[in-house]
Amino acid sequence: MAEQRYRIEGMDCADCALKIEKGVRQLDGVERVELNFSTAWLTVEGEVSRQVVQKRVEQLGYRLAEDAADSAARVQTEAFLPGLFRYLLASRETRLALLGGGLIALSFLFSAFGFDGWGVVALQLIALLLAGFPIARSALVNLWINRDFNMNFLMTVAAIGAVVIGEYPEAASLIFLFAVAEALEGYSAERARRSIRLLAELAPRTALRQTENGEERVAVEHLRIGDRVIIPAGERIPTDGVVRSGFGAVDQAPITGESLPVEKAPGDEVFAGSINGGTVLEVEVTRLAADNTLNRIIRMVEEAQASKAPAQRFVDQFAHYYTPAMLVLAILVAFIPPILFGQPLLNLPDGTRGWLYRGLALLVIGCPCALVISTPVTVVSAIAAGAQKGVLFKGGAFLEALSRVRAVAFDKTGTLTRGTPMVTTYRSVDCRDGQDCEKCRDVLALACALERRSQHPLAQAVVQAAALRGLENRYPPADKVSALNGLGLQGQVNGQMATIGSHRLFEIEHPHSDELCRWVESAESLGQTTMLVCDGERVRGYLAVSDSLRPESEQVVNRLKRLGVEPVMLTGDNPAAARSVAGQVGVQQIHAGLMPEDKTRLIQELRSRYRTVAMVGDGINDTPALAAATVGIAMGGAASAQAMETADVVLMSEGLLRLPFAMRLARLAQRIIRQNIAFSLLTKAVFILLALAGWTTMWMAVLADMGVSLLVTFNGMRPLAVRDEYGQTPAHTGGHG
């Protein structure tokens, strides 16, 4: 079953997306259809041609972009008014509306000079036909295909009703204003979408690849893993890779949101879309273009926008019933008072509004555009702002959930600490003076043999310590290595089943002396993590490892407290090490010595106490807790693939500084959504009362609806300008190249 993707042009609110979805879904051969209003991407699964899809979309009054970049080009990075003028001239429907507006202005000019009569009426009717034909056609096609009423139908009925009662200027004016309002909303929505599309423009389309005969310029899509590319100073890096030669600073702000360039040396990883500094780098490609970090960010953000927040789902459902309800209400208002109470149906000579006119005004007020656009624009802006600063939300639901979080549980190793511990002590039980004797070094060598095949930070610390002392090859790497449920490792070394693990494991399975217990407890009281080593016959000794604190951890914890969020530590490390770190960063609630299932259980307990809980982690052992939390947050810079896949929010930078920013951004988005919904409903309620009292006109109702729609759109775009902790706005992601 083939999947096709098309970019839709001409949508101005989420109601348009629902209409197109429903219409395309009815085509023969279509199995699944999904239209994301925030990104304007239409996904169609099934055996159906582009021509058939295009015809149906155009029947409904919209267009397919010629290519993926076509509609993005419609909205340039220019001032609002010039961009709006360009946008209005790009569409036949809006050109007709502008022509109609010119005729209306001409008719008003004639009336001002006393030239009344059928000539003026003719100009107004021609204007009505020019501006109203696309609207009426879209309304009737939607009614025929989708069997439901939309905003265009309400406007068409209102305009015809105004003509019937002789209100020609009002009929022409309301259709013209409605067409312009729709275009304004579409243009504003397109500017919000542009913030995501700018991400796709960060990576260059070509790369300078090394060959046996020199260098060649190739398309990025033609690069293969293992290729070497040359990155001149000041140019963007074309794909993910590892530096093989050269030293220099790289601006990673577009990917990780880091405010300062990061120094890179041979062996360091670089990301597509980041900017090389002042020297030439030679980079080995590690990911294909389609799978590089930048493209994965773009996919995650687009998928996130397709995932509606609960508030957005509520608004969509409300609008589904709201529009037909307003149509019924307008009919009742127009005819019940004249029929039952003898009220005037038509306008009276003294200027009193008849009830038919009031009903028509209600139809105009009934357009739910401001309401249905209030949430998606805010969500897309917040997700885009987060992505530009190194915070990836995987959906509007998680953005909303993060705004309500009242407790954050942190893993310790790799999250609050750097996750790059170092061996501080290693000692054999046969060593009497505590010096670095040959027996002590043999304990370190045996531990290295067991840890050689592990990627855990503690294992890497052991291997690094052994390598610095030339001990890494004293024993062959262990065979048949297996993890002991978070307590340690075991494997065969020279035919013996050796073990390295926690004091807790050895207390249960490997008897050892009281003296060794005292050594271990003394190291743990200093906040160090200990590991005991057994060669398969007897316990040989222990190692102590300490991890340095992330410099921003204390700052982040304090910021969370100021936001009213309770920090909690969950760690598999020993209680002494946990207390040491917690004391330095200011965490009061500590849970240490935990297995993965213990972390999951404690997350559930925290949820029962705080209701909404976030979990921040980076390792495979954190995955169950990330899944159990209301919001799982992965440290993207050092997180395992499993943690990033399971998490709902990913911090792309190495540190924690983006966490308070993410929470402030989520809370701002929720405040804006509530403001927009309340303002939209309040305005509707006020104008409904004014219409019932006969104190408003149809064109005033259109102006009010247009004004409210634009206000909620601009308000919804505020997250794009939110400042992070460094006092910078997300808009700087274009880099310095």
Image (tube, rainbow, N blue to C red):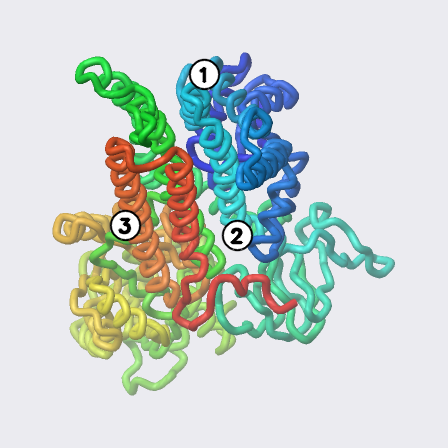
Counting from the top left corner in percent of width and height, residue 521 is at: 19, 74
Q: Is residue 454 visible?
A: no
Q: CA distance from mark 3 to mark 1?
A: 49 Å
Q: Amino acid at mark 1?
A: Leu
For residue 323, side relative to residue 606 (left or right): right
Residue drawn at point x = 61 percent, y = 20 percent = 55
Where residue 693 appears, x then y in whole percent?
A: 24, 33
Q: Earlier in the sequence, mark 3 or mark 2?
A: 2
Q: Depth check: 411 or 564 in front?
A: 564
Residue displayed at 63% across by 48% down: 288
Tell me the residue that label 2 is attached to: 195
Q: Which residue is mark 1?
A: 143
Residue 8 relative to residue 232: left or right: left
Q: Secondary structure at mark 3?
A: helix
Q: CA distance from mark 1 to mark 2?
A: 34 Å
Q: Secondary structure at mark 2?
A: helix
Local crowd size for mark 3, using a 10 Å CA cut-off: few (<14), some (14–19), many (≥20): many
